[in-house]
Structure formats: C-alpha cells, structure tokens
Amino acid sequence: MVFSRFYNLLAEYSTESASDKLNAWRTDTQENISEEDWGRACLKAQKNSINTRLKLIQYKWLMRVYITPAKLHHISPNIPDVCVKCLTEKGTLIHCLWECPKILVFWENVVKCLSRMVECSIPLTSTICILGIYPKDSIRTTKQSKMVDFGLLHARRVIALFWKNVEPPSFTFNNVLTYIVKGKQEEFACIWESFM
C-alpha cells in the first residue's frame, strides 16, 4: 500500500511520456516513425517473448533507460563521455546501440544471419535492429516475422550484456529453451521446426 502511494506520487509529477521517447528515437534515427509503428513496437516488447527478462530488455531500449557514457559524464564530469568500444566518438545512446563501428559490424552479422535463416533480405537499418520496426512487406510469413523478431531481441540482449565491455558482442542464439521450460513446446515447434 505504501509503495502504491509512493509510485502514484512519483508518477503524478513525472513529465516524461512515451511520446517523448518516440520523438527522441525519431531524432536519433532521423526517420519519421509513425505513432502506429511505435505502438506496434511497444506491444511487440510485451509479446515478443515469454521470458520476462527479455521483455524488460526491450522495454529499456524503447524507453531509453540505458546509462551511456555521455549520461555518466553529465552526472560526473570526471567520467569520460566517449564510447567504451571505439574510444573515439561521444557515447550517446544512438552511438552505443548503432553508430559505433564495432556495434555496426555486429548488427551486419545479425542481419546477414537472420536473412539467410528466413530466406529473404532484411534491410540493415536502425529502426529494424534497435526498435524492431520493419516495413510490412519485407517479411512474408508470420513464422519469418517471429524468427526475425526473436533473433533481433536476442541481439539486443547480447548488446546489453556487453554494455560496458570494450570488446564488441558476438551473435549466437542460446535461449530458446525458455519456451520448453514455460510449457510452450507446441508453439516452439510451430515457429522453429522449419529452421532446425
């Protein structure tokens, strides 16, 4: 009860909204992301996986929660504001998630691998990789769409795990057993069987 009152008090005075986050992503990606696409991305964050940690990772990305070197520098000027991977550019969120040359190589590998798996060409764009927003016509079937979404989600997870590391992440699928643990064997088989 006390926590609910405290949360409501904080929420009452909060000036941030999902629209603010959308506008920040529009600025960072330099793309006009529609409200409809943003809504689908937010919904996808909740439905992409049955794993709560993966849902939280996606939510953190969409809501721009990750603490970047630029944010840390703003808090404490003693902390350098450069990217920990390339050590040359300012470590803004868009740089750390997309523009860093080491991260971009990672994304290229992810998209190449997923394109091969679903047998269609997935464009290498920040809105696809970071936000999971891709053109409606680019993926033909629901199975392919789920496969791409799941692969991109795991790529985001790997970036989050390697957030402070100097070395760039590498791309592997390793968490598909969540479906089985949660009793979703049939759903797992329906989506993944053709790729195994």
Image: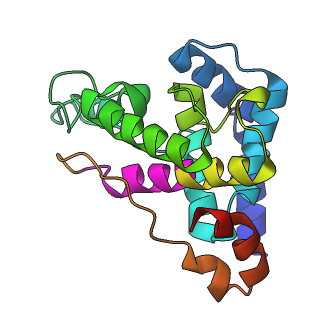
**Residue 10 appears anywhere in the view:** no
Along the horizontal axis of the image, is 34 left or right of 174? right
Quarter placement of the C terminus = bottom right
Along the horizontal axis of the image, is 88 left or right of 62? left
- Residue at figure coordinates x 41%, y 30% from the top left: 98
Q: How many marks?
A: 0
Question: Residue 10: x and y, percent?
Answer: 69, 50
Give the vertical position of 38 relative to 90 (above or below): below
Given residues 191 and 76, the one toward you in this image is 191
Quarter placement of the N terminus = bottom right
The magenta region covers 152-164
Give the vertical position of 160 relative to 5 (above or below): above
Picture quadrant where residue 34 is located: top right
Question: Residue 2: x and y, percent?
Answer: 73, 73
Prevailing SS of the magenta stretch: helix
Question: Residue 29: x and y, percent?
Answer: 54, 19
Given residues 179 and 31, the one toward you in this image is 179
- Residue at figure coordinates x 70%, y 74% from the top left: 188
Given residues 148 and 58, the one toward you in this image is 148
- Residue at figure coordinates x 68%, y 31% from the top left: 134
**Residue 131 appears anywhere in the view:** yes
Question: Residue 130: x and y, percent?
Answer: 54, 36
Along the horizontal axis of the image, is 112 left or right of 39? left
Instruction: Examine the structure image and report whether residue 157 is included in the region drawn in magenta.
Output: yes
Picture quadrant where residue 33 is located: top right
Give the vertical position of 99 relative to 182 (above or below): above
- Residue at figure coordinates x 39%, y 55% from the top left: 158
Picture quadrant where residue 73 is located: top left
